[in-house]
Amino acid sequence: MTSNNEQRYRFSEAPIWNIQRQYYEEQGTKAWKNNQVPQYITSNPMIAATYAEVLFGFLQDRAKMEHPSEPVIIVELGAGAGRFAYHLLDELCRIRDYAGITLPPFRYVMTDLALNNILAWQEHPALQSFIAEGLLDFAQYDAVHDTELNLVVSGITIREKQLKQPVVVIANYFFDSIPQELLYIGDGNVYETDVHVQGLEHLESPQASELLKNIQLRYEHRRAPEYEQSTYPYRDVIALYREHLEDSHILFPVAGLQCLERLNGLSQAGCVLLSADKGDHLLDQWKFAEPPELILHGGSFSLTANYHAIQYFFEQQGALALFPPHHYKNINVGYILHVDKPMDYVHSRLAYRRCIERFGPDDFFNIKVWVDRHIESMGMQELLSFWRLGGYDSEFFIQSLKHISDLLPDATDDEHEDLWMGIQTMWASYYVMAQRYDLALDIGLILFEMGMYEQSKHFLEISVQQDTDEIVSTVYYCLALCCFELEIEEEAWMYVRKLLEVEPDHEEALALMSQFDLHS
């Protein structure tokens, strides 16, 4: 049982999972501050717009089927910081309004294990319009145990077989972070791979964010014939692995499969799954697989999701599973239709082909990795094109800000107009994260450089109102100059005086005041 202070556990019952749970419950939305837990790849506007296209296609398909007036419930598992849900809803509503066609009503339900996240979502300014329209609700949901959804805003409880429309499940960076079994296939037999955990007894910090750094894992196989029994619910998947794999470690998603089965049970019409993860759906990717390594993110970790097992299990029940035919690099996006006559869902299948299979979130992220390294070599047109491809993402704007400033003197009038249009689109869909960033300040300064003084003044004043404790002198100086240019002299001198309060020796402000004294 123990040696050298090691403790042996079944992999799905190892203390690493409780540490992970504790971390997210402690941190709430702060877990994504400073990108401790990666969020950009599954939360940027491009992937959200991709999902919105598939969901819009799904709603079009359901409009022609039974119960078209019943609401479609869209459940996001592990909604985290909430940025993805916001961008998805924002784009889905834009498509709906643009199309102007009759669709079934829908309600998006953000779920998470951490109550702190739900409380933060309820108060987030960007989500209020969706809540007011009845499009957004929240639920605390334990994917390992819970059998129903208790909606916070509406007070509704969704129980087994209650829904008439298929339930839509969204799971991004989810299956790689919940408990999994670890199996070993060798000589046609199935073994459980137990884990010896060392390092817990020396920990002094009670915070979950420090625990994983000190843990060491060692694996040992144990014969597990129960997986081969006819009563085992996922025996067909295991039989496939026994036939085709050798000397292979398999992360087997029992908790994930059971969660999907429970959510499927909420509806009389089945479910569909849209999911993005570090996850392999090709059997060959599991051949001769080594034991997993924990990829640490702050006080949490992730593994590789076994999309193959999920795909195979649901295909055996008549589902249609769509995954890209090519290999993924950073993130794999799958769409599984566990519904009656899945081939009838033409619009959503076409949207998957158009927005994921041909060029999808993984392709976009791969290009962005290259762009990140070569921003300074890009011209204004290239920057604008990539920014547009990414849905006018604020993170790319912030990242490119210095280079945009360098390019402005040589930019054409058309490029100035397109930059201003992109800024307006970006600001209209900006989602504030736990790590607050003064985007209004950056916008205001860029517009000042562009000579758009009225617009610059608007954003610089937003910056001042948002953060009165850390106003830099440059902001007051630019505001003063904007007011002078706009011939609002009384307000201009007010900002000059405020500037001198912050920085009494500011040379330009003193020069302006001396001119004012001369003319007064």
Image: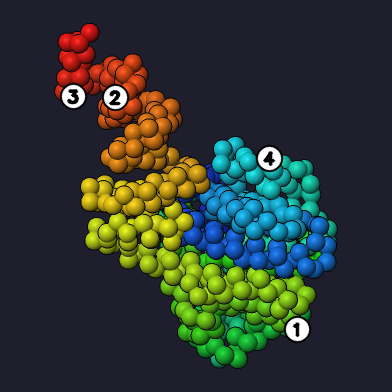
Observer-side mark, 1 or 4, equals 4
Helix, strand or loop at label 4? It is helix
Observer-side mark, 3 or 2, equals 2
Q: Earlier in the sequence, mark 3 or mark 1?
A: 1
* Residue 484 circle label: 2
Q: Are marks 1 and 2 in contact (CB under 8 Å)?
A: no
Q: Please say which color scheme the image uses.
A: rainbow
Q: Where does label 4 land, which residue?
A: 132
Q: Within the image, what quadrant is residue 190 found in?
A: bottom right
| Residue 279 showing in the rendered view | no
Q: Residue 393 or 120: which is nearer the viewer? A: 393
* Residue 508 circle label: 3
Q: Residue at x 45, y 45 (%)?
A: 424
Q: Are marks 1 and 4 in contact (CB under 8 Å)?
A: no
Q: Are marks 3 and 4 in contact (CB under 8 Å)?
A: no
CA separation, marks 3 and 4? 48 Å
Q: Is residue 335 above or below residue 160?
A: below
Quadrant containing the C terminus is: top left
Observer-side mark, 3 or 1, equals 3
Q: Residue at x 63, y 41 (%)?
A: 129
Q: How many marks?
A: 4
Q: Where does label 1 land, which residue?
A: 230
Residue 196 x/y as whole percent: 50, 67
Helix, strand or loop at label 2? It is helix
Residue 34 x/y as whole percent: 40, 47
